[in-house]
Amino acid sequence: MTIKVGEVIAINGVKVTLRIFEDSSKDTLFYDGEKYKGISIREYIYIQRGFRDIVCIVEGEYLDENRFEEETNRTHYIRKVEAKPIGYYEHGDFNEGIKFLPMIKDSAFLLQEEKISEIYSKGRTDGFVIGKMLKEDIPISLPWQKLFNSHIGIFGNTGSGKSNTLAKLYTVLFDQKREAIGNKSKFVILDFNGEYTSEQLVKKDYKTTLKLNTQTGEGDKFPLSDEEFWDTETLSILFQATVNTQRPFLNRLIGGRNKYVNRPNSLLSYIQSSFRAVFSAASQKPDSLDLLRGIAEVLDLDNLKASLKDISWHGDRNKFWRSRDSTFFDADGISYEAVFGREVKSIAINDLDGFAELLIRANLQLTWDLISGFVQFEHIQPLLKRIDSSLSSLKKVVIIGNRRDNNQLLTVISLRKCNQEIKKVLPLLIAKHFYNHHKASIGYPPDMTMHLIIDEAHNILSQQSTREHESWRDYRLELFEEIIKEGRKFGMFITISSQRPADISPTIISQIHNFFIHRLVNDRDLFLLENTISTLDSLSRSLIPNLSKGSCIITGTSFDLPMVLQIDRLEEAKQPDSEDVDLETLWS
Ligand SMILES: Nc1ncnc2c1ncn2[C@@H]1O[C@H](COP(=O)(O)OP(=O)(O)O)[C@@H](O)[C@H]1O
Ligand SMILES: [Mg+2]
């Protein structure tokens, strides 16, 4: 038995209008020892219709003129509210959806608080709680079984509480399920701001933290196996190769390497034969001189560098020459032997890392491609320049060769101290690495899952970036689009958090199943959410610009009804290290 508060006076479509009795406008009511919320916007009531109780949410209220009393000169108003059905109780069970509508004169009652909790927790008692309902202050248990096998989006302006929500979600998950998860699932966080590198999320025993640093080179390094590095796609990502000419070039380079990789000194003889070819080819190419200089530079061969300095191109004769003694390099190779023979034979290679080898091989490949008239220098040279210029920072954050598989539950990769370029390319490589690795190790149906979590995802998923080549942008997005579109089949799930959802590729947004939406004020962001999230109702939508810190609307395929939760703030040690400066402490 509960409190009767009003009756239905109109029904229009799915909009129900009720007349509310005068004494029901208190904030909280007690009846028979139970607590009830009074009627106001976003509160719940139920309407009795035969054996069923139709549960409605209040969407608006207003006063309507009732009658005018002449003697007191007063107008009497009645309070009316508009409500929308969200589901119904039948035989004691709640079912969501508008299947039944009330009729005029049906009575409306307040809904006990515990029923509200029952509706949103759906009878879940395993207590996966990350927060409370904003208005009712009731803890709600989330359906973790349905949530973590979906793609999740966490959106909101800076400072709205995204990182806290993300951290809370996974902290509760690891607190409750770590043992059950065992080594069946892996979690990887791409942490652009270095917010999760200390005590956050899970005990250190279960967490590997890689703090990459392009500034000092003393940071951790992301390990790549040999096979993974010497791969056209990897190199294309690292050096942003264009599809038409530069990628086939890398392909040839890798093909050549694979062919001879098991022969001792294969690289050395490749270098030596290339020097000979440049200076004794029938049709010599002026640009190849610079390539040889590049190789001497990488190998740090001072004598050879000096010898090459003397050489230049003789435009009239179309061949190289040494002007100081008018030595021409003819196709018979005699001048080559005289000038370079001994020096080139004495080249020794020791301890070359993968990056240096790549640079040398790129120079050699282009040399041969030029000699055979296969490519145009201008098409490939930018790629070589990029390899050359990114090497120093790449070397600081990637290590090739000794890859140990880490079997930790959680890997946090902090990019906070990386330069812009690394922030742009490395996440791609990392995502691809884990995606491919996961695909190769699962059974069918998937017996393991992989969870990639990207905080501040606009760093890599944004659609607009004027500073990069269009084709590179497409490639970058395609990779993530593939993971998000195909990943689910393989048990790979993405959680992305971003302050600018409107900048993120619509393909990606449209694949997200569940949303945690914090305060957002920008019209474009709101427009996007309204148009892509089919489960977002207009009442919840209208709250978004005014949500307070830590409150968010949760909606999506794993939730029957949108709900507004105030997420619990994590205890201090487990809070993300946000970059907010506390001026009070700083200036005290
Ligand atoms: N649920 C919450 N309750 C109370 N304070 C919060 C909550 N979530 C975040 N905050 C506070 O708001 C600030 C910004 O939170 P943060 O999660 O870093 O936001 P964002 O990642 O959206 O920029 C932090 O100082 C944090 O302590
Ligand atoms: Mg954040």
Image (cartoon, grey):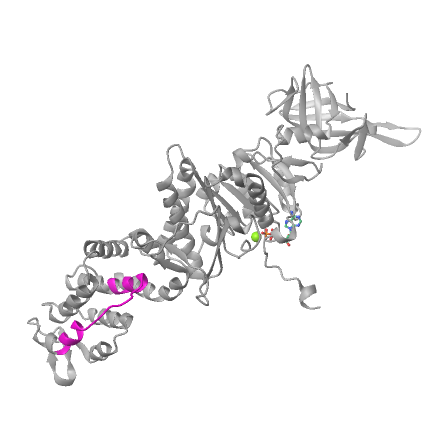
Locate residue 270: give its quadrant.
bottom left
In which quadrant is the C terminus drawn? bottom right
Name the spot of residue 65 as percent of width and height, x first: 80, 30
Name the spot of residue 382 as percent of width and height, x first: 30, 63
542, 228: nearer the viewer: 228
Name above or below for residue 119 compared with residue 584: above
Name the spot of residue 393 as percent of width and height, x first: 40, 64
Q: Is residue 499 visible?
A: no
439 vs 267, left or right, is: right
370 vs 297, left or right, is: left
- Find the magenta span and give its range: 339-361
- Direction right: furthest residue: 71
Locate residue 30: give its quadrant.
top right
Name above or below for residue 553 compared with residue 305: above
Name the spot of residue 46 as percent of width and height, x first: 70, 24
Residue drawn at x 22%, y 54% as measured from the top left:
258
In which quadrant is the N terminus drawn? top right
Residue drawn at x 23%, y 64% as measured from the top left:
377
Q: Is residue 31 visible?
A: yes
Name above or below for residue 223 compared with residue 59: below
262, 104: nearer the viewer: 262
